[in-house]
Amino acid sequence: MQVAIVLYPGFTSLDVIGPYEVLGRLPDTEVVFVTEHPGLITNDLKSVSINAAAKLTDVPAPEVVLIGGGPGQQDQMADGPLHKWLRAADRTSTWTTSVCTGSLILAGAGLLAGRRATTHWGAIDQLAGLGAEPSTQRVVFDGHYATAAGVSAGIDMALTLAGRIAGDEAAQIVQLIVEYAPEPPYQAGSVDTAPESIVAGAIRKLSGRFPS
């Protein structure tokens, strides 16, 4: 099975590395980082780069497509080579997936029309305008599309996907290998549980990150 993880400048690292750590450990799986312009692709914090050696056109028909989010997502919304590749790959993919605001790119490419999908809580209102049906669930499956909410939700989505691809036992083995047993020190991981002051602080910090 070939998994193509799409990179672009300004991606959020955990959006792609979380699923990479899960899906890359499945049997008989090759993970390829693909991008429009191969080379070192730098993340949103400008301190981590991933070498994406494959052009989009080098990987025409992966079984799994995954695209993450990040501030750079805003520059990937216009129709162009990435959207064209996504539409072509989607025609033959077994799964087309996203993490965080990567779902906005899928929706912008016309792939989520009429589909239930999720994204980061700060951008959830944008999905409807792109033709998708917004959901506040952490992970959403609709047809052969799987979307995850913000950042860390990509691990949950990847483990769920791993179970569908390789079976529950294989997915649980991977979960144990990566020791994914979260015990967060604070109940501030969602807008439903975080104190109002924390939500307000996050909104201020993300100001301009999710333009309407």
Image (cartoon, rainbow, N blue to C red):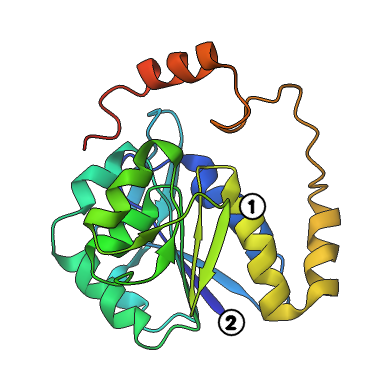
> Which kind of residue does numbered mark 2 sit on?
Met
State the image quarter where residue 188 is shown: top right
Write down the residue under mark 1: 155
Question: Are the residues at dot 2 and dot 1 in contact (C-beta closer than 8 Å)?
Answer: no
- Give the residue furthest to the bottom: 92
Q: Nearer the viewer, residue 128 or 95?
A: 128
Residue at figure coordinates x 37%, y 77% from the top left: 59
Q: For the residue carrying disc 1, how many other residues have a C-alpha within 10 Å: few (<14), some (14-19), or many (20+)?
A: many
* Residue 172, placed above or below residue 156: below
**In the visual, does 19 lie left or right of 72?**
right
Write down the residue under mark 2: 1
Q: Nearer the viewer, residue 175 or 135?
A: 135
In the rendered structure, find residue 168 and report the number of the disc placed on it: none
Q: For the residue carrying disc 2, how many other residues have a C-alpha within 10 Å: few (<14), some (14-19), or many (20+)?
A: some
Looking at the rendered structure, the secondary structure element under dot 2 is loop
- Give the residue furthest to the left: 79
Residue at figure coordinates x 43%, y 49% from the top left: 119
State the image quarter where residue 211 is shown: top left
State the image quarter where residue 21 is shown: bottom right
Q: Earlier in the sequence, mark 2 or mark 1?
A: 2
Quarter of the image that includes the C terminus: top left
Res 24 seen here: no
Return the x and y of residue 171 as percentages of the image width and height.
77, 67
* Residue 25, placed above or below residue 185: below
Residue at figure coordinates x 71%, y 65% from the top left: 25
> Which kind of residue does numbered mark 1 sit on?
Ile
